[in-house]
Image (cartoon, rainbow, N blue to C red):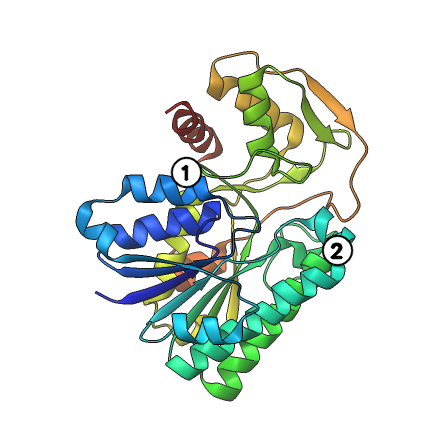
Amino acid sequence: MRKCVVTGVAGFIGSNLAEHLLSLGDEVAGIDNFSTGKEKNIERLRASLKPQEQERFTLVRGDIRDAELCRDACRGAAVVFHHAALVSVPLSVEQPRETFDINCGGFLNILQAARANGCRVIYASSSAVYGDHPELPKRETSPLAPLSPYGLAKMENEQWAALYWKQYGVPTIGFRYFNIYGPGQDPHGAYAAVIAAWSAAFRRGEKAIVYGDGTATRDFCFVGDVVQANVLAAGVEDARAFGSVFNIGSGRSVTLLQLFKALQHASDAPGAPLAFAPSRPGDILHSSADIERACAVLGYTPRFPLEEGLRLLLNAEQR
């Protein structure tokens, strides 16, 4: 048994990851200030746990901008899985200062805490670091040209993580997540991820809103594959992994119009009508992941095609 810290544990990635780590026999300390994380994700997590797993889970209500809290939470931990962040691209355009404070300052606190406690750090970066550079698919060596404060902060995180590996010997591994979806993702609000928002619209019979003309492409990755990548990174010993970043996606991109049809098919219903709205500032037009490096170094293999992931999501929402 090892102690793991999961920041952003009340988010949908953090809660799914914590559930899996506990099922493996790990002890988990989860940090969240609930600014975007949801109490219902913690309730769902606790409800899924066996009694012995409940005993190995500790919830720390706090903010990663609190350096002392981060240091205390990481005491005795082997691995920190860092997923706490201001996660919305459009919101980061509106609130660049808060984005910097949380996503950069908070991450630096995590790196310092890991250095003090001898932890490995697995952290969430983003495909937003690539911006709209025309090279497709995106490779880890592709030019970086973020279009938003969110993307810029994630790019800076990667540089800090590489520095902490080279300068201080903190083992860091970053993941450039593409478009992650799955149970526990917030479907509400102006900045909801498209699959979460559309599946909620399907259930309510409301319009599904697409920003732009629907030809934008995304690489949608089910949260189960994200959990797999994190677990692999926690155990990898290949020196190529440390101080480095990896694309995590499905390796397959679809247009938003194709996604809408796939969601209709997975739900066995015509679904909501599709409504078009203007593109949002900071949104990327095309996104496609080359995942060969993650496959070669980490042993990552996507297990959930889009159609299966959508069915799993819809089944979970119906329970």
Q: Nearer the viewer, residue 109 or 229?
A: 109
Give the SS element for disc 2. loop
Quarter of the picture containing the C terminus is top left
Quarter of the picture containing the N terminus is bottom left
Q: Nearer the viewer, residue 246 or 68?
A: 68
Name the residue rendered at 27%, 61% in the picture: 27
Q: Position of residue 256 (x, y in %)?
A: 65, 31
Q: Amino acid at mark 1?
A: Phe
Q: Which residue lies most toward the left here?
A: 52
Q: How many marks?
A: 2
Residue 18 left/right relative to 152 = left
Quick check: can you spot residue 112? yes
Which residue is disc 1 drawn over?
304
Name the residue rendered at 48%, 60% in the picture: 293
Give the SS element for disc 1. loop
Q: Kindly identify which numbered label has been placed on residue 95.
A: 2
Q: Kindly identify which numbered label has been placed on residue 126.
A: none
Q: Which residue lies most toward the bottom here?
A: 167
Q: Position of residue 20 (x, y in %)?
A: 31, 49
Residue 45 left/right relative to 164 = left
Q: Quadrant of residue 144?
A: bottom right
Q: Amino acid at mark 2?
A: Gln
The earlier-in-sequence mark between 2 and 1 is 2
Position of 304 relative to 152 (above/below): above
Q: Position of residue 60 (x, y in %)?
A: 41, 60
Q: Quadrant of residue 260?
A: top right
Name the residue rendered at 54%, 38% in the picture: 186
How packed mark 2 is, by other alpha carbons closer than 10 Å (few <14, some 14-19, many 20 or more), is some
Quick check: can you spot residue 170? no
* Contact check, label 2 and label 1, Cβ < 8 Å: no
Q: Position of residue 107 (x, y in %)?
A: 56, 69
